[in-house]
Amino acid sequence: MVPGTSTAAAAVNEAQAEPDCAERNGQARPACCPYFHQAVELVGRRWTGAILETLMQGGSLRFSTIAAAVPDLSDRMLSDRLKELESNALVERTVFAGPPVRVQYALTLKGQELAPALHELKRWARHWLRASA
């Protein structure tokens, strides 16, 4: 990032540097970056952001701890989202031999790299969503 520029400006500059994201046929025009779109679709799925936020706060957590931290999240939905996050290498599932057998979930390095983006989203939400409530 260039000193004196905002995170948003740095993101715009970075997107403009990516030919796949901002330039088509040699002409700059508005276009949705496929990487951005894929990331938003993944993180923006129902409950996924709340699960990621919980894991960022708590580190390695058991299923029941995650479920208790996110109100109204069914066990089935939590299981589905954790599998999806695991298949995208954002979450790592570790099984500890028992008895009883324990399973814990933690963010991978790839998942931890989302922290700045989720922090900015949380900051934005606190400012703008609180103001509109």
Image: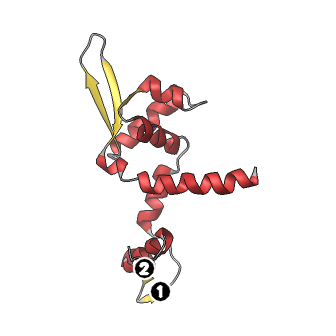
- Disc 2 or 1, which lies upstream in sequence? 2
Q: Where is residue 128 in the image (x, y as percent from the top left)?
A: 67, 57
What is the spatial separation of the Cα atoms under label 2 and label 1, in whole angstroms?
8 Å
Q: Which residue is drawn at 41% across and 36% down?
A: 82
Q: Where is residue 80 in the image (x, y as percent from the top left)?
A: 45, 35
Does residue 28 lie above or below 45 as drawn? below
Q: Which residue is drawn at 57% across and 54% down?
A: 123
Does residue 86 lie above or below 36 as drawn? above
Residue that lies at the very extreme toward the front in this rendered image: 4
Q: Position of residue 45 (x, y in %)?
A: 52, 47
Question: Which residue position is annotated with label 1?
Answer: 28
Taking the image as shown, residue 133 lies to the left or right of residue 2, namely right
Please say whether residue 41 is visible from this viewpoint. Answer: no
Residue that lies at the very extreme toward the left in this rendered image: 97
Tag shown at residue 12: none
Q: Specify the quadrant of the image occupied by residue 127.
A: bottom right
Q: Quadrant of the N terminus?
A: bottom left
Q: Which residue is drawn at 53% across and 79% down?
A: 30
Question: Which residue position is annotated with label 2?
Answer: 16
Residue flagged by tag 2: what amino acid is it? Gln
Please say whether residue 87 is visible from this viewpoint. Answer: yes
Where disc 1 sits, the SS reads: strand
Q: Which residue is drawn at 54% across and 40% down?
A: 47
Residue that lies at the very extreme toward the right in this rendered image: 133
Q: Do the residues labelled 2 and 1 touch (CB within 8 Å)?
A: yes
Mark 2 burial class by Cα count in 10 Å: few <14, some 14-19, many 20+: some
Q: Position of residue 88 (x, y in %)?
A: 35, 47
Residue flagged by tag 1: what amino acid is it? Ala
Given residues 112 and 82, the one toward you in this image is 112
Q: Specify the quadrant of the image occupied by residue 14.
A: bottom left
